[in-house]
Each structure stands twice: as C-alpha cells, then as structure tokens.
C-alpha cells in the first residue's frame, strides 16, 4: 500500500509519474529516430534552407505517430479516452475553423505591421494558376499535421497532466518554455524568435484554458504557419519552404523585421499575441462554459 501511494493518488497515477513516463517514451522514440537517420544518412530538415513538401509531409506524419504513441500508452494507464487530452469537446470543427481564420488574420496583421515599418519587402509572385492552388492545398495539409503533432506533444497530455499536478498557470509556463526550446535548433532562429515562440505557446495555452480543447490552437497553428511559409513566403522560425506564393525578404534591424527568423522574430509579434489573447477573452472568457471548462484542470493528483 505504501508503494502504491507513491505512484497512485486519488485521481489515479500521480501527475509527476505520468509526465515522466510520457517523456521517457518520447525520448526512446527520438533515440530510435536518430539512429534510423544515422543509418540511412538522413539529415535534419532544421538545417535545410528550403524544405520540399514531401520532406515535411513525411516528417510530420512520423511526428504525429510519435505523439500518438505515448499519449495512447498514458490513456491506457489512466483509463481515459485516447482523445481526452484536448481533442474532445463540443464544436471541434467550428473551433478549428475559427482558429484557422484567427491565424490567417493575425499573421496578415503582423506582416502589415512590418510593411508599415518598412521591415519587409515584397519582391514578386512566384506561383500562379493551378500550381498556386496545388501547392497551397498541399502545404495546408502539411501544416495541419504540424499543428496536430506540436499541439499533441506540448499542449496535449503534458499540459493537461501538469495542470492536474501543479496548476494550469505553472503548467502553461512550463510547456510554453518547452515550445520555445523546441525551436532552438532551427536554422536562422534567434533569441527574440525563441521568446516569441514561447509567448505564442502561452496564448495557445490560454485558448485551451478558455475552450477546454486544442482545436482552436490546432487551427491557428496550421493557418499561422501556412500564411507565413506559403502565402507570404517568409521564414517560419528560421525555416523556408519550396513552393510558396510570394517572394519576400526582411529589411532593416532584425529585432524589428525578424531577420532570418521571420516575423516571429520581430517584437511586433508580442503586440499581435497580446491583441489575440484579448480577443480570446472577449469571445470565450465571460461565457458560462468558461467556468465549466476550468474543472478539466482543477483535479489534484496529490
């Protein structure tokens, strides 16, 4: 009984052990992936100057599976539905669509700020006609998978479980810091860009707190990355893609333009995220559903 109390609390397996098991499984997956890459001489896409659609599509499918495995294992251990860590809840498709619209508007506003500050230069249109539509559709699928994988890894099981063991505020701080660190290996990333990624992560956490699910965050994640990489052709956390609609370049001081990092490396991203958080609160924060959703994170595992 004493040994059981070490691992199991009133709410089931204690949050700390759950997080440790989740991270251990993910670490083993990462090690296996690294060994496969070494064996087949596969380089990291983080050091590629322009990423092709098929390259990123394959990588994101692998990452979705890698996120699903530890989540599934923990759902079996905790006797919960597999999708219960953020992928359930009402109006999932509607929230995804609102998230996607928010991502497009927010990123367009950010690029607009850069244009007004003369910190971005629009050079030319690269694609047109059928090619533009085809690349646009393929890249949205890819970035949808990016949203699923990154949200599941950071704001899925880890956020829900840390919130159960600590509280939602500290859980959001921890997973947002992790989200920033995850971008540190990208070619062209900057300290300002890492801070920007962490702040973006906090806003995504805030959306989970308000809505009780990840679907708005998945939508904005997908559309934000799609708008950066495909529509405007700017760097996304230091990474660029092949097959983008517009050709643009940063201009002026990196702290203002984002430099090689892209718009996420600009201080303007802080303003955009603050406005986005305010809109989230005005839309969802005062509804009765907000009070109901808080119970998702209020359970203690101690």
Image (cartoon, rainbow, N blue to C red):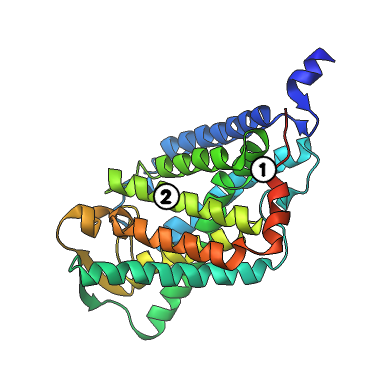
User: Secondary structure beneath disc 2?
Assistant: helix
| Residue positioned 77% across, 49% down in the render | 81
Residue 255: mark in rendering = none
77 relative to 255 in the view: left or right: right
Residue 219 showing in the rendered view: no
Q: Position of residue 254 (x, y in %)?
A: 20, 54
Give 232 or 110, whichever is nearer the viewer.
Answer: 110
| Residue positioned 50% across, 73% down in the render | 101
Q: Position of residue 257 (x, y in %)?
A: 22, 59
Query: In the rendered picture of this protein, how many numbered marks are placed on residues?
Result: 2
Residue 199: mark in rendering = 2
Q: Residue furthest right?
A: 1
204 relative to 242 in the view: left or right: right
Q: Is residue 39 above or below residue 211?
A: above
Q: Is disc 2 surrounded by few (<14), some (14 to 19) or many (20+) residues within 10 Å? A: many
Q: Find residue 210 and report its image quarter.
A: bottom right
Residue 242 showing in the rendered view: yes
N-term-proximal mark, 2 vs 1? 1
Give 230 or 298, whichever is nearer the viewer.
Answer: 298
Q: Find residue 180 and report its image quarter.
A: top left
Q: CA distance from mark 2 to mark 1?
A: 25 Å
Q: Find residue 162 and report its image quarter.
A: top right
| Residue positioned 36% across, 65% down in the render | 228
Q: Which residue is mark 1?
A: 71
């Amino acid at each position: 009984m004493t040994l059981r109390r070490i691992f199991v609390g009133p709410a089931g397996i204690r949050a700390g052990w759950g997080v440790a098991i989740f991270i251990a499984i993910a670490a083993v997956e990462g090690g296996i992936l690294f060994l496969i890459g070494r064996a087949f001489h596969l380089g990291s896409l983080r050091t590629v100057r322009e990423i092709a659609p098929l390259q990123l599509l394959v990588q994101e499918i692998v990452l979705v599976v890698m996120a699903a495995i530890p989540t599934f294992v923990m759902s079996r251990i905790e006797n919960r539905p597999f999708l219960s860590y953020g992928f359930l809840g009402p109006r999932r498709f509607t929230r995804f669509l609102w998230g996607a619209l928010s991502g497009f508007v927010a990123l367009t506003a950010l690029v607009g700020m850069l244009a007004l500050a003369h910190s971005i230069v629009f050079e030319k249109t690269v694609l047109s006609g059928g090619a533009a539509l085809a690349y646009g559709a393929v890249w949205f699928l890819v970035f949808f998978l990016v949203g699923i994988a990154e949200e599941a890894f950071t704001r899925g099981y880890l956020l829900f479980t840390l919130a159960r063991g600590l509280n939602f505020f500290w859980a959001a701080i921890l997973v947002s810091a992790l989200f920033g660190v995850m971008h540190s290996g990208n070619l062209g990333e900057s300290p300002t860009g890492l801070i920007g990624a962490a702040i973006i992560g906090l806003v995504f956490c805030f959306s989970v707190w308000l809505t009780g699910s990840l679907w708005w965050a998945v939508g904005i994640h997908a559309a934000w990355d799609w708008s950066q990489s495909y529509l405007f052709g700017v760097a996304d956390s230091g990474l660029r893609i092949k097959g983008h609609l517009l050709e643009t370049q940063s201009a002026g001081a990196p702290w203002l333009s984002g430099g090689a990092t892209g718009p996420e490396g600009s201080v303007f991203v802080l303003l955009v995220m603050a406005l986005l958080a305010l809109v989230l609160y005005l839309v969802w924060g005062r509804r009765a559903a907000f009070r109901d959703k808080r119970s998702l994170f209020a359970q203690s595992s101690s």
